[in-house]
């Protein structure tokens, strides 16, 4: 499974360039040239990180993020901006962006910032989240390894595991889990969810995921 | 309000108020002197009238056959009679010399007494000047001047704002234009730079590296010029966020940024950067300061020259082996758009920005330069 990035940038040339670069770096990139398209993508796909330009048609980057945060979506966001004043940066942060990068930027810098933000969302500074017993979760590839050997897990299971890792020791209710787990055209199934949990428990240890009856699950680390 | 705007408004107000006040003072003075004259004149009329009264009383006395003569007593005025030789005979005015030596705060009226009743030839009547109406006049004039100056200050202020408004509007328009342009330009520059980076990192054809490097340098220069322009443009309304900045790190990072530029001139870099020098400065100000010093030192350097950068606890010294600046020009060079050598590109606003940052933070900026040997710029932030 790969990290999915939403790229909101109205300049076609720059959009293509950044997309090409990020794809070369192994990310899956969904591009949007205006705020409405970005909203569409963010509700249809399970985006892991967003790169947002501020001045884009239809819905500005600021408004887009504001609406998203109001909806309770916590997807990490980086603003790509050429606005000059400090006030704009302040506004961006107050709306809930996690980082910003000024135009013109070096792709290398963008890459570093994306990776560090991804790591931060898993609460670590390393490329992998250590789960003990030789188990590790690769943030970049979104895969589970034991002693550097990949444990085969389905995409949905990995997605669920990633969600647990991003919210360790926090109770996740069914609503939150379903929102992340199922695509917009899929019907949430509690039976499948139980199967996924069982499979994850089998890989990382039964005690790591607590069942809170009728409410949800909690990942304990 | 812009600084220049404030300055012209203050100047306008000063000239306007001074000239109006001058005019009003003149008018008030003329009015005051004439009013004062009239007030004194009316008091003199009273004296004249009283004098007539005394004269008629004297006549009555002269014609009466009483043994005891009573000198006419008048409550309003003092009076005295003098003989033909101007010698004091009698009167309620006791000072005998009053005919010649007169008191400042008193008005006098001298009348001839004919025929010479009781041997008196002159009658002098005097009265202390009643200053109250004059003081009232002074008060009302002062009040009027005060009211006028308040009124004209307010009027002048609004007039000034009115005159400045179109200028302000065009400045704001230009500010917005530059801001927008910078924004618009940043995106294509980003595209150029990122694509150069893409080719350098992933491209297979390594034959065009020189051409690419030139594109990269040119785009970076373009981007920096616009940074400078925005900086100058926003300088007055820019919100400074003064934080502790690691000057050593910043300087090293910027040196790396300028490396490709320095390499094209085959410059030899000498760096004496002390570690962890902390300076309280706004990040953007620090960037503009360092960027402009470095880019100038590279731009005006000769081929195979030396670029020396020294950072100590107190100073930043950038030394180049370039064309140098004439001592006559050295003074002028701090001014905007002044360029020592017009053959080279760039706006030459670099040093202007350097001097502006130094001025803002009260840093000492000094330059030493020798023609065809080089220039040395010293910035001292701890005194």
Image: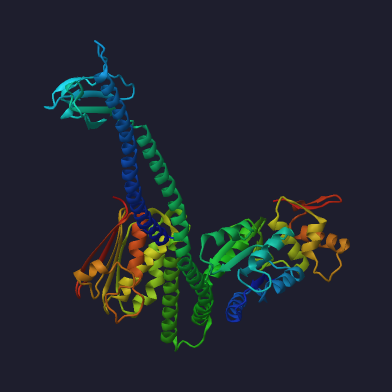
Question: Is A29 above or below relative to B317?
Answer: below
Chosen colour scheme: rainbow
Could you tell me if residue B277 is visible in this image?
no
Q: Quadrant of residue B90?
A: top left
Write the residue at 24% across / 66% down.
Answer: B331
Q: Is residue B268 above or below residue B147?
A: below
Residue extending furthest toward the left: B85
Is A109 left, or right, of B380 in this rendering? right
Q: Nearer the viewer, residue A60 or A191?
A: A60
User: Which residue is located at x 75 percent, y 55 percent?
Assistant: A205
Nearer the observer, A93 or B10: B10
Residue A151, relative to residue B58: is it above or below?
Answer: below
Position of B225 compared to B348: left or right?
Answer: right
Please tell me whether residue B58 is drawn above or below residue B312 in the rendered image: above
Q: In the image, what residue occupies the spot 38% across and 67% down?
A: B291
Q: Position of residue B280 (x, y in %)?
A: 40, 52
Q: Position of residue B189 (x, y in %)?
A: 50, 78
Report if residue A137 is visible in the image: yes
Tell me if B294 is positioned left or right of B200 in this view.
Answer: left
Picture quadrant where residue A56 is located: bottom right
- Depth check, front residue: B107 or A162: B107
Q: Is A37 or B28 nearer to us in this picture?
A: B28
Q: Image point 25% across, 19% down: which residue?
A: B63
Across and down, in percent, residue A27 comes to: 64, 73
């Amino acid at each position: 499974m790969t990290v999915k990035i939403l790229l909101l940038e109205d300049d076609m040339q720059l959009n293509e360039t950044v997309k090409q670069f990020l794809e070369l770096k192994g990310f899956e990139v969904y591009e949007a040239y205006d705020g409405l398209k970005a909203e569409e993508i963010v509700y249809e796909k399970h985006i892991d990180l967003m790169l947002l330009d501020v001045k884009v048609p239809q819905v500005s980057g600021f408004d887009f993020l504001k609406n998203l945060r109001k909806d309770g979506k916590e997807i990490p966001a980086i603003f790509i901006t050429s606005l000059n004043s400090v006030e704009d940066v302040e506004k961006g942060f107050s709306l809930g962006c996690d980082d910003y990068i000024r135009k013109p930027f070096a792709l290398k810098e963008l890459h570093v910032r994306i990776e560090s933000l991804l790591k931060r969302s898993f609460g670590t500074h390393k490329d992998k989240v250590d789960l003990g017993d030789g188990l590790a979760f690769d943030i970049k590839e979104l895969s589970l390894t034991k002693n550097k050997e990949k444990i085969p897990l389905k995409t949905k299971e990995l997605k669920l595991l990633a969600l647990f890792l991003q919210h360790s020791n926090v109770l996740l209710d069914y609503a939150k889990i379903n929102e992340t787990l199922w695509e917009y055209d899929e019907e949430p199934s509690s039976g499948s969810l139980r199967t996924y949990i069982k499979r994850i428990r089998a890989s990382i240890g039964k005690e790591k995921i607590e069942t809170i009856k009728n409410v949800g699950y909690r990942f304990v680390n | 309000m812009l600084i220049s705007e404030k300055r012209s408004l203050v100047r306008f107000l000063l000239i306007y108020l001074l000239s109006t006040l001058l005019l009003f003072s003149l008018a008030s003075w003329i009015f005051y002197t004439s009013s004062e004259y009239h007030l004194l004149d009316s008091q003199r009329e009273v004296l004249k009238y009283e004098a007539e009264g005394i004269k008629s009383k004297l006549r009555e006395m002269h014609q009466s056959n009483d043994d005891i003569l009573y000198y006419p007593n008048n409550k309003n005025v003092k009076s005295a009679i003098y003989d033909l030789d101007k010698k004091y005979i009698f009167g309620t005015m006791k000072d005998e010399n009053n005919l010649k030596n007169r008191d400042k705060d008193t008005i006098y009226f001298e009348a001839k007494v004919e025929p010479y009743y009781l041997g008196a030839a002159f009658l002098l009547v005097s009265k202390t000047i009643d200053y109250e109406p004059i003081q009232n006049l002074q008060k009302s004039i002062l009040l009027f001047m005060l009211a006028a100056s308040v009124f004209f200050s307010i009027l002048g202020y609004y007039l000034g704002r009115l005159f400045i408004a179109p200028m302000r509007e065009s400045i704001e328009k230009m500010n917005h234009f530059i801001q927008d342009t910078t924004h618009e330009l940043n995106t294509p520059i980003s595209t150029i730079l990122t694509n150069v980076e893409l080719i350098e990192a992933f491209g297979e054809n390594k034959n065009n590296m020189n051409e690419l490097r030139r594109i990269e340098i040119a785009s970076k220069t373009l981007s920096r010029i616009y940074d400078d322009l925005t900086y100058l443009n926003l300088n007055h309304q820019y919100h400074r966020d003064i934080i502790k900045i690691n000057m050593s790190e910043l300087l090293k990072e910027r040196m790396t940024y300028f490396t490709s530029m320095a390499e094209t001139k085959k410059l030899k870099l000498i760096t004496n950067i002390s570690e962890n020098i902390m300076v309280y400065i706004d990040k953007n100000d620090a960037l503009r300061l360092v960027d402009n010093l470095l880019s100038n030192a590279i731009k005006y350097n000769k081929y195979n020259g030396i670029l020396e950068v020294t950072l100590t606890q107190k100073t930043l010294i950038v030394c180049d082996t370039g064309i140098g600046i004439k001592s006559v020009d050295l003074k002028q060079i701090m001014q905007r758009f002044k360029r020592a050598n017009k053959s080279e590109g760039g706006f030459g606003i670099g040093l202007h920005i350097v001097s502006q940052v130094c001025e803002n933070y009260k840093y000492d900026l000094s330059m030493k330069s020798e023609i065809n040997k080089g220039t040395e710029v010293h910035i001292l932030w701890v005194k």
